[in-house]
């Protein structure tokens, strides 16, 4: 992979990392505000509880993506970014453009997903 491509993905990953951190902080503020509300009936409680569950699920998903981004940034620093963790071939540029924190090439990703379904 050329240096310009690595820089492109590093910038993309760092930008996404900043956005995720902002999102997580914002959701945590919203959850704190919801938890501080005085709820007067069961309908209000159910609504707040449902919102809290949805927001928590979003935060969990974004925290996972943040971990994957940090791993990808570590690989960039180590000089082994864009290499499939299963077959050790290069991950295609188009795949990385869609998911810059990908750890598997398309073929290996399909193998991993099929093995998870069993």
Image (cartoon, rainbow, N blue to C red):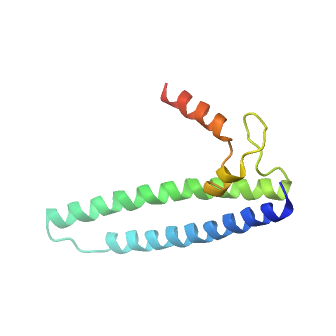
Quadrant placement of the N terminus? bottom right
Q: Which of the two residues, 103 or 24, is positioned nearer the viewer here?
A: 103
Q: Position of residue 46 (x, y in %)?
A: 21, 60
Q: Position of residue 5 (x, y in %)?
A: 78, 61
Decide if residue 105 is on the left or right side of residue 2.
left
Residue drawn at (31%, 63%) of the image? 51
Residue drawn at (62%, 54%) of the image? 99
Give the tally of numbered discs. Answer: 0
Residue drawn at (19%, 67%) of the image? 44
Q: For residue 109, what is the image quadrant?
A: top right
Decide if residue 36 is on the left or right side of residue 62.
left
Decide if residue 52 is on the left or right side of residue 24.
left
Q: Is residue 63 above or below residue 109?
A: below
Q: Position of residue 6 (x, y in %)?
A: 79, 61
Residue drawn at (73%, 45%) of the image? 91
Q: Position of residue 113 (x, y in %)?
A: 55, 34
Q: For residue 53, what is the image quadrant?
A: bottom left
Decide if residue 12 is on the left or right side of residue 23.
right
Q: Residue furthest front?
A: 94
Q: For residue 12, what is the image quadrant?
A: bottom right
Q: Is residue 113 above or below residue 78?
A: above
């Amino acid at each position: 992979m050329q240096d310009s491509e690595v820089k492109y993905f590093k910038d993309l990953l760092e930008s996404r990392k900043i956005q995720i951190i902002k999102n997580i902080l914002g959701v945590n503020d919203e959850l704190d505000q919801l938890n501080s509300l005085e709820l007067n009936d069961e309908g209000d409680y159910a609504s707040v509880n449902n919102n809290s569950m949805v927001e928590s699920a979003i935060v969990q998903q974004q925290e996972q993506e943040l971990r994957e981004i940090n791993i990808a940034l570590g690989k960039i620093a180590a000089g082994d970014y864009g290499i499939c963790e299963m077959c050790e071939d290069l991950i295609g540029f188009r795949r990385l453009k869609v998911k810059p924190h990908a750890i598997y090439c398309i073929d290996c990703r399909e193998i991993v997903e099929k093995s998870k379904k069993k």
